Image (cartoon, coloured by chain):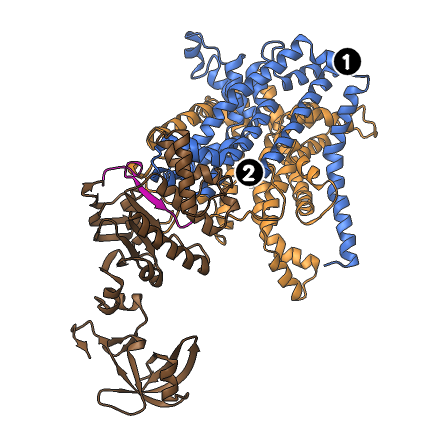
Chain colours: A orange, B brown, C blue
Amino acid sequence: MSAHPASATSVPVAPRAGIRLPGVGAGLGRGTVVLYLSVIVLLPLAALTSQAFEDGFSAFWTQVTSPQAVRSLELTVGASLIVVAINAIFGTIIAWLLVRDEFPGKSAVNAVIDLPFALPTIVASLILIELYGAHSPVGIDIALTRGAVVVALLFVTLPFVVRAVQPLLIEMDREMEEAAASLGAGGLTVFRRIIFPNLLPGLAAGVALAFARALGEYGSVLLFAGGLPDTQVSSVFIRSQIESGNNVGAAAVSVVLLSAALVMLAAITLVQRWASRHERSSGGGLTVMPMSGTDFTAEKDDDENR
Amino acid sequence: MGITVEEASKRFGDFQALNDVSIEVPNGSLTALLGPSGSGKSTLLRAIAGLEALDAGRVLIDGEDVSKKPTQKREVGFVFQHYAAFKHMTVFDNVAFGLKIRKWKKQETSRRVHELLQLVQLDGLAGRFPSQLSGGQRQRMALARALAVEPQVLLLDEPFGALDAKVRKDLRSWLRRLHDEMHVTTIFVTHDQEEAMDVAGQLVVMNEGRVEQSGSAADLYDHPANEFVMSFVGEVNRLGEHFVRPHDMAVALDRDEGSEEAMVQRIVALGFEVRVELVLGDGTEVWAQLTRAELQKLELREGQIVYLRPGQAKSFSDETLVA
Amino acid sequence: MRTASSARSRWSLRTLGLGYLALLLLAPLLLIFYRTFEHGLAPPLEAITSPDGLHALKLSLLMVAIAVPLNTIFGIGCALLLVRHKWKGNAAIDAIINLPFAISPVVIGLSLFLLYGTKGWLGPTLSEVGIEILFSVPGMVLASIFVSLPFVVRETVPILQEIGTEQEQAASTLGANAWQTFWRVTLPAIRWGVAYGVVLTTARVLGEFGAVSIVSGSRSGETETLPLFVQKQFDNFHFAGAYAASVLLALLALTTLLAMNVLKRKEDA
């Protein structure tokens, strides 16, 4: 943080300057937070990792490389990549429509984007089966196929790219595009050279998060794609291993998924650091997650007190 | 309530904001802490309020050492540059805040709040929210809020910095009149020397964490302790070792003993005063401030050679005054 | 740029984007509403008011009632800590808080299962003092807390950063102590962000499926939340029940979206 006294947000930690936490010193507060996080998050994950390697690394490896484990991982990763690519494109288009276009019902559409965030995944599975399964009114039956995996993942990862790109589009300085146009650049060129590079950080973060989500998705895939060997994603595989009592196997594959998740999170943080090197101060070193429910009105909120 | 600061020092990481600073603020006075950005004036003010903790030194309010007292016990009124209005509270609730903390009864609170709102001429806006007020109104509200609890000391941190020039001037004279009425020991921070000289009885000029000089406006202007103070508190020309105020620069058409030759580069009429930009033989650029009458008498033209005679120059290497 | 070709591309973009949304989101949702009430109001109503259905609803609400306040208090406290107090460990805390966004619910469920199971680190000890975590409410609560951990923190942090400390400093110059400042100045300033975070947390807890499914054993009438109820009904071919519960959850989801919309506007105001 800035060492300059003019920085309005720097407050020394010395007690007489005003304790921020009611009645508790920062140390005690920190301790509570760390305790809470340890009990809720760290301890369970540690137990998981410990179980995965309980019988040694070779046992871990055997489990992870078992035919079905590998098949499910291949399906999971493959489907996730496809899904993320598709939603990157559609997500950007939709974000564009929400920010730059005007049409009746826009605010409803903007609200509905978050449906996959708010709807329980099992319900998503159900509604997808209804429309695109055995009793489909439009005759499309992709239930219990690999296509079902893709469609289910498309559903749950839809909001990520939209919500990551929207704020960037809103904030983007129109004047850059106008300058490019005045220099002779056509629509597509402007998009390719001006707009897209500015959206890249948001796109990358949204894609990373969507990918992590897709890898681990369970509820929406469960009913729609089923659990047969050919259409079994890793999460369903892990579940079946738990049911058969193979805790080590379940834990092993879980560790693989967990590692992938960690890598994705690290990637997001890095992308944000890299992106904010151009910008004024962003988030003070804390990661900004593409969250749901962006207010898409194009007026950037003016902080009147500054 | 007089304020004394003794040998205050404060650093932020590598940056030494205050370096052994000592000042005396007389009871009931209106003092300005004047200096450029980074001079430490805000830090000093905040240290007096207890919003910054000093690494070394003491702060005494009315003779009592308050260095260990937390802000909320020091009874200092503080006004921030960006108002620090409680955005979610009405004007009334903002001003009443300190009173509510002190558990004043509803009726008394209401009486006092309205009294203050009248004083700052915001009567009738009690039910509004800060976002509905102009900058000047918000600052007046902030002042009323600070005064509501009858503080021993009033501290203002660049109070008019965020406002338009016209509003700034209005609030300036308004602050002076307020002080005349209320006689609360007041310290305000500014980087605008005109503002400081207009409002304050005493000025403390700071630079790079130190006090350069303190005194009345006239003292600082006529008897600056060093080059920094002289150039900060007014316009200055440098002629070799000497520093001359533009209005002390006598312009003559004939050479005289001790006068310097210069060529008129540009003549700018700025309202009631005239600015004559000149260049010396060695290439140094200076300017003289003349009245219209003087200009007409001399009938100066661009390119003309004239002779400059400093009326009063200061030299800080040997401290002698050249008449 | 109002040329004919740009109007055309505008329309093709709209068709593409909105069409995609319609096919993926809207159509399935509408269909389920139709299917549920296809044979009238009675069948779904009957299914949802069955003992198991009601219990599932109550259990889901219980999860919310416990997990949401805990995560809200934690969230506000943690946000204050992260924004107002610089500490080397802040980045680590930040990273851990983000984990629930990226970890599979099944992995979460499994890790709780292993920690509190009969062969786990804490399982046996807790059993001895009579505390059963797995296959009962406590375990489900822990799972709910894990998955919904980040929302209040994430929504509160940017607001705290934006409002800065000046209002709080002003409050202390006016004589307010730390608690008074927090209660009268800080909390009101962040309230819409917190509210928004609470809505997101609630939605997440209500909708949680994978982790709770592993941890609870999904015993009907005992450890079955509404989403688990949906699965059980579907597996047993009781489609009316499955649809009814789904519609209920979908309505809750839509209410959530509405609340999010309203609160987001207040937050940005």
Q: Nearer the viewer, mark 2 or mark 1?
A: 2
Q: Is residue B203 above or below residue B115?
A: below
Q: Give the residue number, with chain letter if any, for mark 1.
A: C43
Residue A105 on image: x %, y %: 73, 40
Residue sitting nearer the eye, A161 or B296: B296
SS label for mark 2: helix
Q: Is residue C14 left or right of residue A250?
A: right
Q: Which residue lies at the image location 49% right of the left edge and 35% below the top edge?
A: C190
Residue sitting nearer the eye, A206 or B68: B68
Q: Amino acid at mark 1?
A: Pro
Q: Amino acid at mark 2?
A: Glu
Residue sitting nearer the eye, B90 or B213: B90
Quarter-of-image position of residue A203: top right
SS label for mark 1: helix
Q: Is residue C79 visible?
A: no
Residue numbers of the magenta segment: B67-82
Q: Magenta includes B76? A: yes
Q: Is residue C265 left or right of residue C189?
A: right
Q: Magenta includes A212? A: no
Quarter-of-image position of residue B53: top left
Query: In this figure, what is the number of numbered marks?
Result: 2
Q: Give the residue number, with chain letter if any, for mark 2.
A: C267
